Image: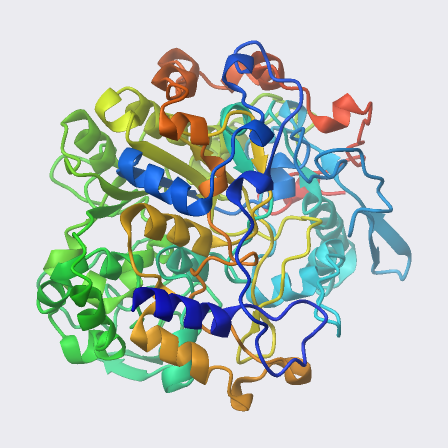
């Protein structure tokens, strides 16, 4: 029966290809390529990496055999879930990837790179251009301001044409336009810096730890944000494969009005496209005991609360045969469970063993940086907490016991408190680092050429100390240091390392430039592109990973879900009865997008197809079968002395990890625009 459901659903959810927006039926499902055919090697492995490199052509395995082998080897999956960087922004010059100056196998010209030269008109009507350029230690590139990643702004940036293809040419114009509209030279000055900032990129001198993992293991260069939106919808998509499309099809897109004392407002409806706060923990939530936390630094306006999310998630499918018992403990089943009534018995009937899960997020509970006996939640970014948006997870003690703080991860690892039978563990940072680190200032004369004043230094130390890699409030080296501590903790425990896979990825792009057009799979009720969003980084670190490899597998956060489904034998979310019915109902003409675009993807898409692939290509068959030994934990470990020293490798990260970025390999020297300021909103006095 499961095979029949999978086959039928695959046919009904395969995406409309770009350029066929008016197609009235979904094309027949096609099998995804063999994982081995999607992989090629990065060039020039260092002496430390070379012994572990295996030619993908000499090491192949069918997907079914790969799944069977993975189930024998991998029991622990860790997802280091970072914030807000496009692929080109972080890895656009990593050798071997489809980046800014190469298609991964050979150099590519600017003319052949979509959006490489961005064009816009300034406030005086003059034609201007912006193009990618490197920022590094000289520009204190570990901390920058954030660019526009609103739903509307992102739609303008990717610029989908009538043919359904994103042109990727609106990044600089969108940034310039949102500031110059205020009028005057001061606004124009800020607008120009933002038009350039959105095109900036970094390399291994700024994020050497992240590049080290990409260089030593497998990086994916064809993974996108699930939704063309800011963080919240993609935090939800990490566990649901969607941000409310199923709920939209079933109940419409409008929110619900609430009045709780002086707090009156209407929740934001589905699918979510902004960064509203979770309903549970908000001013509209009347829960008394076991109340969910609210981040004190997040925005809880009456107009900024999300509707309770009610569709299926991976934590639900991981309940396995216990799904009915676990969900029966929900405190408000009529409110939380209406849209999974058929899913619950379906999941339970499969008889699958329950899979443990935890979502560790900084600030959720008492952290090491909090005063004794006082849980401040000061570092908690509540709109990044995916499970809290679902009543049946947040409002159920059997489920919400799995939601913990970041410090709990390290204490659980140290104390041997992870489940003996494995599980899935999501790890997220927040507004400030539990390490207590301050951002490294590598150039004391930037952006203030006269030297940063004590007040400016204090502003940087106070406002750029987050560890989830979100531009605006995080520092990139503090963030990669947090990830390194997670990976080191796993690698230091052989019993866990030898059964592990670690996924390092991002929710969305922050709106930074990327040249690869996302496949447009759906439109929202507002008529704007919904899926997919801009390309994001994805790295798989594992003792069974391919070394020094690049995978071209195409997907989004559903790729993570597909991989979990494969490892733990979970039913695809798209195969569950409630979601399957909504996927079919979403094809009705009343949900059509622009130009009659038929919506084949209003819901999760975690059934394996070429357009929605998994991460299995990251794994080396010879390591899974025992023909080669697993990669040792030491291969993934960055010494504590290095992790704890800022700046990392004293700003010479590329040399330290043995990687020459693609622009330097080709002799390309991108010029930082004269007077450019990476902190145009933090220190506007230094804008041009």
Along the viewing direction, whichever of 272 and 423 lies nearer the viewer: 423
Q: Position of residue 118 (x, y in %)?
A: 80, 52
Along the viewing direction, whichever of 288 and 42 lies nearer the viewer: 42
- The vertical placement of 440 against 123, above or below, is above
Residue 497 appears anywhere in the view: yes
| Colour scheme employed for the rendering of this structure | rainbow
- The vertical placement of 164 against 216, above or below, is below
Please give left or right for residue 598 compared with residue 129 in the image: left
Q: Quadrant of the C terminus?
A: top right
Please give left or right for residue 377 compared with residue 286 in the image: right
Along the viewing direction, whichever of 207 and 375 lies nearer the viewer: 207
Along the viewing direction, whichever of 358 and 149 lies nearer the viewer: 358
Number of numbered discs on residues: 0
- The vertical placement of 594 against 6, above or below, is below
Q: Quadrant of the N terminus?
A: bottom left
- The vertical placement of 70 against 226, above or below, is above
Q: Residue at x 22, y 24 (%)?
A: 495
Q: Position of residue 389 (x, y in %)?
A: 30, 64
Q: Residue at x 44, y 38 (%)?
A: 504
Q: Position of residue 618 (x, y in %)?
A: 48, 36
Q: Position of residue 332 (x, y in %)?
A: 14, 74
């Amino acid at each position: 029966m499961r095979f029949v459901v999978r086959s039928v659903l695959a046919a009904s959810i395969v995406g409309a290809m770009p350029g066929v927006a008016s197609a009235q039926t979904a094309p027949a499902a096609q099998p995804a390529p063999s994982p081995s055919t999607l992989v090629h090697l990065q060039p020039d492995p260092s002496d430390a990496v070379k012994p572990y490199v295996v030619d993908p052509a000499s090491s192949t395995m069918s997907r079914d055999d790969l799944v069977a082998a993975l189930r024998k080897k991998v029991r622990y999956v860790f997802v280091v879930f970072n914030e807000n960087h496009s692929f080109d922004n972080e890895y656009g010059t990593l050798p071997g990837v489809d980046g800014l100056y190469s298609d991964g196998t050979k150099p590519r010209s600017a003319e052949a790179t979509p959006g490489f030269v961005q064009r816009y008109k300034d406030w005086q009507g003059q034609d201007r251009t912006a193009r990618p350029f490197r920022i590094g230690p000289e520009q204190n590139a570990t901390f920058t301001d954030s660019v526009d990643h609103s739903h509307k702004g992102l739609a303008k940036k990717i610029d989908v044409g009538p043919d359904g293809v994103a042109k990727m040419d609106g990044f600089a114009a969108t940034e310039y336009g949102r500031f110059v509209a205020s009028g005057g030279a001061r606004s124009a000055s800020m607008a120009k810096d933002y038009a350039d900032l959105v095109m900036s990129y970094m390399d291994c001198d700024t994020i050497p730890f992240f590049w080290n993992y990409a260089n030593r293991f497998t990086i994916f260069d064809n993974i996108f944000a699930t939704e063309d939106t800011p963080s919240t919808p993609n935090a939800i998509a990490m566990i649901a494969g969607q941000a409310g499309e199923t709920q939209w099809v079933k109940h419409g897109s409008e929110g619900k009005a609430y009045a709780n004392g002086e707090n009156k407002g209407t929740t934001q409806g589905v699918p979510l496209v902004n960064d509203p706060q979770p309903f549970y923990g908000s001013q509209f939530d009347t829960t008394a005991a076991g109340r969910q936390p609210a981040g004190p630094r997040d925005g809880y306006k009456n107009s900024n609360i999300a509707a309770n999310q009610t569709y299926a998630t991976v934590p639900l499918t991981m309940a396995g045969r216990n799904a009915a018992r676990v969900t029966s403990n929900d405190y408000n089943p009529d409110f939380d469970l209406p849209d999974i009534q058929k899913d619950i018995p379906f999941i339970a009937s499969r008889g699958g063993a329950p899979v443990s899960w935890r979502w560790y997020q900084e600030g959720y509970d008492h952290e090491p940086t909090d005063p004794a006996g006082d849980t401040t939640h000061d570092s908690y970014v509540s709109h990044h907490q995916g499970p809290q948006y679902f009543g049946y997870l947040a409002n159920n003690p059997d489920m919400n016991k799995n939601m913990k703080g970041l410090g709990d991860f390290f204490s659980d690892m140290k104390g041997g408190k992870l489940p003996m039978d494995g599980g899935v563990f999501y790890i997220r940072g927040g507004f400030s680092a539990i390490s207590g680190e301050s951002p490294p200032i590598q150039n004391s004369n930037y952006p203030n050429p006269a030297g940063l004043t004590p007040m400016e230094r204090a502003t940087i130390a106070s406002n750029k100390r987050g560890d989830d890699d979100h531009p605006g409030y995080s520092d990139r080296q503090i963030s990669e240091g947090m990830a390194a501590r997670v990976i080191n903790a796993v690698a230091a425990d052989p019993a866990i390392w030898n059964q592990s896979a670690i996924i390092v990825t991002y929710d969305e792009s922050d709106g930074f430039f990327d040249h690869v057009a996302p496949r447009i799979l759906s439109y929202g009720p507002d008529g704007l592109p919904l899926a997919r969003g801009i390309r994001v980084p994805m790295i798989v670190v594992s003792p069974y990973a391919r070394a020094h490899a690049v995978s071209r597998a195409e997907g989004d956060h559903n790729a993570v879900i597909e991989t979990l489904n494969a490892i733990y034998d979970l039913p695809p979310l798209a195969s569950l009865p409630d979601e399957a019915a909504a996927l079919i109902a979403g094809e009705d003409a009343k949900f059509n997008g622009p130009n009659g675009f038929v919506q084949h993807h209003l819901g999760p898409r975690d059934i394996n197809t070429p357009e929605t692939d998994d991460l299995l290509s990251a794994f080396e068959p010879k390591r899974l079968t025992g023909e080669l030994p697993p990669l040792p934990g030491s291969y993934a470990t960055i010494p504590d002395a290095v992790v704890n020293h800022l700046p990392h490798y004293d700003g010479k990260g590329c040399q330290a990890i043995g990687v020459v970025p693609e622009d330097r390999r080709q002799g390309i020297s991108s010029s930082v625009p004269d007077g450019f300021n990476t902190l145009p909103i933090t220190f506007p006095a230094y804008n041009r």
